[in-house]
Amino acid sequence: EPEVTQTPSHQVTQMGQEVILRCVPISNHLYFYWYRQILGQKVEFLVSFYNNEISEKSEIFDDQFSVERPDGSNFTLKIRSTKLEDSAMYFCASSSGTANQPQHFGDGTRLSIL
Amino acid sequence: QKEVEQNSGPLSVPEGAIASLNCTYSDRVSQSFFWYRQYSGKSPELIMSIYSNGDKEDGRFTAQLNKASQYVSLLIRDSQPSDSATYLCAASPYTGNQFYFGTGTSLTVIP
């Protein structure tokens, strides 16, 4: 069964540094998403991406964050000037359509900011 | 009111029993509903989706939707220890495509 893959599985970074989290969505999906989950808290939406542009973003997704689809398969989340509170599990998801279609999640990247 | 609310539990049921998980939602997120299972430290795994009022069955799982009461539930029949996980309710809005997740209900199935 097709799946969303994410790398790395765990990223440890010093506060203030930049990180790039990578995702390969399911190949025939058109909509891509990033969510985060702080330990013990709920899954929170960050951003959705369609047709090479951001279609929706949450209040969390400020100027510190950016997304990119650099080629036909990868979808990346860049976090600049990382802060301690950015420590969380970051999940990439993809879907074949919009709101009525299930979103399929990758295994996540655990980001630890020191 | 939060978009999606769940009782965080924990919910414990004996092996073989029916586990009932509940979720309520606000007017803002009333289009489509999804149940995900999340094992500790792992990603959400889609179990079921439901879009219209009534019941939808898939194996041991039954999702129930009542739009008048803004209520969606998941029943797990013949619960197994491997069903022990956190169950996340998610809903999508009429406009936009983000999912709103509840805080999840922790289920433990006791052998």
Image (cartoon, coloured by chain):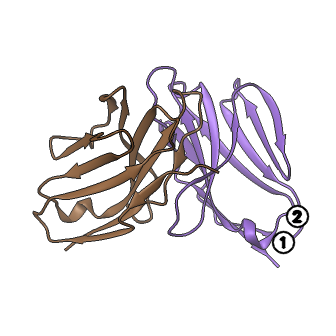
Q: Position of residue A17 (x, y in %)?
A: 12, 63
Q: Secondary structure at mark 2?
A: loop
Q: Which chain is brown?
A: A
Q: Position of residue B106 (x, y in %)?
A: 63, 63
Of the pair A7 and A109, the residue shown nearer to us? A7
Q: Chain of mark 2?
A: B
- Name the residue beneath numbered marker 2: B17
Q: Which mark is residue B14?
A: 1
Q: Secondary structure at mark 1?
A: strand
Of the pair B35 and B6, the residue shown nearer to us? B35
Q: Position of residue B71 (x, y in %)?
A: 68, 35
Q: Quadrant of residue A83?
A: bottom left
Of the pair B101 and A92, the residue shown nearer to us? A92
Establish whether labels 1 and 2 are both on one chain: yes
Q: Position of residue A109 (x, y in %)?
A: 38, 62
Q: Which chain is purple?
A: B
Asked whether the residues under the numbered discs 1 and 2 touch, taking CB atoms below 8 Å apart as contact, a structural biologist would say yes
